[in-house]
Image: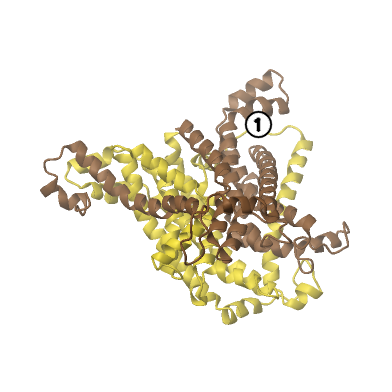
Amino acid sequence: MSTLATPETSRPVGLARLSFANRQALSGYLLVLPALLLLLGLVAYPFFFAITISFTDRVVGEAGHWVGLKNFRYLFNQPSFIKTVTNTIVLVVVADIAKLCIGLGLAVLLNQAVPGRGLMRAVVLLPWAMPGFIAFLVWKLLFTPIGGGLNLILTDTGIYTGIIDWLGQKSTALPAVIIATVWRGFPFWAISFLAALQGVPQELYEAAKIDGATAWQRFRHITLPSIRPVILIVTLMSSIWTANSFENVWIMTQGGPSDATMVFPVLAYFGMQTQRLGEAAAVSVAMIPALLILVFFVTWLIKDDD
Amino acid sequence: MESIESRTTLPATFERGWSRARRKPKLRKLGSLVGVYVIMLIVAAIVIFPIYWMFTISLKLPREIYRLPSLVPQAPTLDNYRELIEKKHFLVNIRNSLIVASSVTVVSLLVSSFAAYSIVRFRYRFRGLIGRVILLTYLTPSSLLFIPLSIIVARLHLGNSLFGLIVLYLTFSIPLSTWLLSGYFRSVPPDLEEQAMVDGTSQLGALFRILLPLSLPGLAAVGIFTFTGAWNELLFALIFITSEDKRTVPIGLQYLITGDVLLWGPIMAGAVLAALPVMVLYFLAQRFMVQGVTAGSVKG
């Protein structure tokens, strides 16, 4: 197959005897080949390569030796790794719940026929249209003790007149990162839910109203079941991204203060800078099992959808 | 592509709802209407304030930022923009980002069109498997890959080059573009292409002369998504670009915040310059998406 340049030039000579179905198949393979080779070479291969590296004591410039589970044993005894695991769980769970509530609430709200709804939808899209790293730069600025907007608002309105170093103290750093992450992420949820809501037949609501169902009952028994698949897919995909997001933590805190906001990608990045690639790879590989479960459900749901 | 809530992962169904809003019976009680507006105002304030703050800080000098903080700039100035461009070589960053993002867009659209065309229109063994592999590569986060990729990139001598960055960005733009384009292609009835092929057009001719022109709104939307995704990427650029003259926009700004003193004025000026083109492009894309994906989602 590799000797044939394109289906067009080769067909008259070599493929004249091939049946239509075989020619079809060959063209199909050739067309998908560039994409497939690139993805196998630069996604699939590195993925498995990462797993093998994590079982070696590889450093930059040296292939290293097989050390079995040593890197993982080392990691699980590291306080910073334990902190990374708990931070990631807190970040994903809290951000997911916040985005679910805000997204669902806004979607229901924007699905009402109120004047000004179109403008509001455009406004809600803004954080999503903004480049992620810019959004987190701006939030880093907002959380700055002096010159940042948040403390200014608090003092101007008289809510709290002290100076809070939001990103500099352990107790507020992770909540601050979560707030910025939710701000950037909720529009996607709202939009997806709104689209799903508009696919729900209006007759269901009218019938329920005639039967005397309250607004909450209509939401609970019509809205929620109708958009359940969308909620599931959005939650799963968003969890994958949030658990692996680098730029929110990197730009705002770089994992600090003292690991209070450390997450997997940032820890792996620091590990790579120490040149000990085996240990750094083990950080990323340690989250593969959790990731696989999420990915399995996503692909299963998407297959179901088709 | 940026990982979180990447704009490019919009389900096709969204556009359907977005474009033609359904009328619901008007809210009866004035009270609940007031409640709706109060919530909307709060949400709008929370969304807009950070963006407003970005603009105002970019117009303020340090004296005004730190010593006399106020919600409205007292003496707006463009000095920050001047400093960013003259002293921080921001135009070089913008040029590099433009080169990378437009190359990724062109190559990605071409390769993904071929792949999507193959998956949608051709019948062969493993077609389903190949489609699945492409979806799986889309779900593989780049934070899992950067350590092995650093070894592979060094082996291929692609480190510290814009070309290397372009190749790496293709790994996340191609799966997404292929996935989205497959949706558009499926919505185009195959009859026209079949007719053209009966008339003697080659399969590639049918793709370029019939299928792609018919999918133009979709191509535009996917193209803009790919462009903004490459424009925004931070992690790979941070790892693989080491010399100053090859820094892209995210890296240029990133280095401004790792210094000892945070020059918020120039940083926010850079943020405005980096965000504006993307946000404008993005709203243009919305229009295309509405036309394009409405057709694309018919397959339901």
* Residue B48 placement (x, y as % from top left): 69, 57
What SS does tag 1 mark?
Answer: loop
Determine crowd level at label 1: few under 14, some 14-19, many 20+ residues with C-alpha closer than 10 A. few
The residue nearer to you, when weighing A255 against B85, is: A255
Say which colour chain B has. yellow
Left or right relative to B180: residue A184: right
Placement of A17 over or under A221, stated as above or below: below
Left or right relative to B136: residue A23: left
Visible residue check, residue A154 = yes
Left or right relative to B284: residue A99: right
Say which colour chain A has. brown
Point 48% across, 73% down: residue: B246
Q: Look at the image and tell me in which quarter the C terminus of chain B lies.
A: top left
Q: Identify the residue at the far top of this view.
A: A211
Placement of A202 over or under A210, stated as above or below: below
Visible residue check, residue B221 = no
Point 71% across, 46% down: residue: B40
* Residue A128 placement (x, y as % from top left): 59, 53
- Label 1 is placed on what type of residue? Pro
Point 69% across, 75% down: residue: B260
Tag 1, which chain? B
The residue nearer to you, when weighing A120 against B178, is: B178
Please name the residue that numbered disc 1 is placed on.
Answer: B25
Question: What scheme was used to colour the molecule?
Answer: by chain
Left or right relative to A193: residue B110: left
